[in-house]
Amino acid sequence: GFSWKLNDHPNLPKGKIISMVVLDGWGEANPDQYNCIHVAQTPTMDSLKHGAPDKWRLVKAHGTAVGLPTEDDMGNSEVGHNALGAGRIFAQGAKLVDLALASGKIYEGEGFAHIKDSFATGTLHLIGLLSDGGVHSRLDQLQLLLKGASERGAKRIRVHILTDGRDVLDGSSVGFVETLETDLAKLRENGVDAQIASGGGRMQVTMDRYENDWDVVKRGWDAQVLGEAPHKFKSAVEAVKKLREAPKANDQYLPPFVIVDDSGKAVGPIVDGDAVVTCNFRADRMVMLAKALEYEDFDKFDRVRFLKIRYAGMLQYDGELKLPSRYLVSPPEIDRTSGEYLVHNGVRTFACSETVKFGHVTFFWNGNRSGYFKPEMEEYVEIPSDSGITFNVLPKMKALEIAEKARDAILSRKFHQVRVNLPNSDMVGHTGDIEATIVACKAADEAVKMILDAIEQVGGIYVVTADHGNAEDMVKRNKKGEPLLDKSGNIQILTSHTLQPVPIAIGGPGLAPGVRFRKDIPGGGTCQRRCYCDEPTWIRGTQ
Ligand code: 3PG
Ligand code: CO
């Protein structure tokens, strides 16, 4: 039968303190002026790369190597940390939704049956990120769901869009809205009353995460549920075009808007008796809205009305909270994660990041499960992130504070695994601000140094790696790899992640002599990191 017990490694010493450092959005790419990691001063990461050649290598962090549908799918933090934490590859939400739509199984489950009961008398509301980024959602999945739901009796449909510009190019929102409008027009021709009802930029409206700023969710609630927003338009294409004209406006940060009819009335507030689907498959940025929609007891903001609706998530977003309770597609069952093994084998763990990435080293790491496995064996520390700013304004973020916490945890010798996420290169990279991203990379490098110094002091081991690329390439390129220019001759900034591989380095005084990366696994992905060394990445030998 199955046992949590891990056997000791036959010849490696046990009990060494190990630190796992995940640099978020830190890939490897050609050294040019758009590679912020190259331009920034990063002496610590450079020394790892140019140090012992068998203790540094690159691994894939995108595509099928990490459980994404195709090789064109860039990596992201959810799949990256799921893979790191579980040490195995799982078909991710994106893929599972694709399969459920292709087979039609999505319409046969309990989740769809639940919402379908509203179709005769109520409106079906779809809320989600509108792009083909494939990180949180995909436009083609929304299109299929619209078609499928209308064929199965949805007579009145309202879509509440969130514009992207973060997983896709800024400015692409206009095209996505136009595509959606064309689809909705076709539905109307077939007698379905289908319209966009509200919208806003993903970083302004609805898609906050880890409870960093509930105002973001409230702004969405006001528009989607109450039909109230500072901006009112007759059409969503017009809304997005107009709102983008404001100085410094971008897709990520568009203010909330509602679509109104000729009499100025919002066309699609959510009311009792309606059905709601949150269409994102990725969890982190939908959990807060799911709570607002589902929890009767709720004090994060004034909802004005608690809705009696039929709600389903595209997936279940939190396996521990069972949130939401109804969902269209079952999430990947990420079980037997390293964190759970460790608590069962007497290994104490410490995890830390700042709010905007805190769930990455806890929730994602543990297989999309919130909370501790065994509180007495674990300590999770969250450093509050700055909220209400874009991180190019303060690109050092909390890197130093995170490193100090890790250092103290290491030096306390109370924990055997100390893991952190350093968010800078990702969070600032997403703003598209190249100067700030250079500062961000330097700050992350300094944080790594502080942690490695502590590991040196306690005779421990370090593993430094990344979840996916971002800051190493800040420009959109053609097939030849040359920067693409827009109509005015400016380079097209890449705010998204990349398809680049990421580094992994091992070392520290506690690493037994002769431990090195294997050279015979050329196509490895992030979850296979631990197979590369003759020593397991975790404290004691895993399988
Ligand atoms: C976000 O949610 O900020 C981006 O879509 C993806 O970034 P992450 O995968 O690094 O969190
Ligand atoms: Co990112």
Image (tube, grey):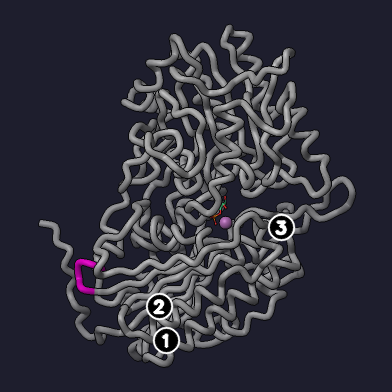
Residue that protrudes farthest toward the right in the picture: 488
- Residue in the image at 71% along x and 27% along y: 236
Magenta-drawn segment: 342-346
Residue toward you, 18 or 147:
18
- Residue in the image at 44% along x and 42% along y: 299
Above or below, comparing residue 181 to residue 316 in the picture: above
Label 2 beta carbon within 8 A of ligand 1: no
Residue type for callout 2: Ser
Badge 3 element: loop
Residue type for callout 1: Ile
**Residue 103: image x %, image y %?**
39, 27
Badge 1 element: helix
- The reply to whether dot 1 and dot 2 touch (C-beta < 8 Å) is yes
- Of mark 1 and mark 2, the one earlier in the sequence is 2
Residue at which label 3 appears: 432
In the image, taking residue 122 as reference, residue 241 lies left or right, namely: right
**Residue 503: image x %, image y %?**
52, 71
Is residue 271 at all visible to an observer of this figure?
yes
**Residue 383: image x %, image y %?**
49, 67
In the image, taking residue 46 as reference, residue 519 lies left or right, namely: left
Residue at which label 2 appears: 19
Residues packed near mark 2 inside 10 Å, few (<14), some (14 to 19) or many (20 plus): many
Badge 2 element: strand
Residue at which label 1 appears: 455
Residues at marks 1 and 2, CA–CA distance in whole angstroms: 7 Å
In the image, taking residue 535 as reference, residue 146 lies left or right, namely: right
Residues at marks 3 and 2, CA–CA distance in whole angstroms: 30 Å
**Residue 151: image x %, image y %?**
48, 13
- Of mark 3 and mark 2, the one earlier in the sequence is 2
Above or below, comparing residue 505 to residue 509 in the picture: above
Question: What is the chief secondary structure element of the magenta stretch?
Answer: helix
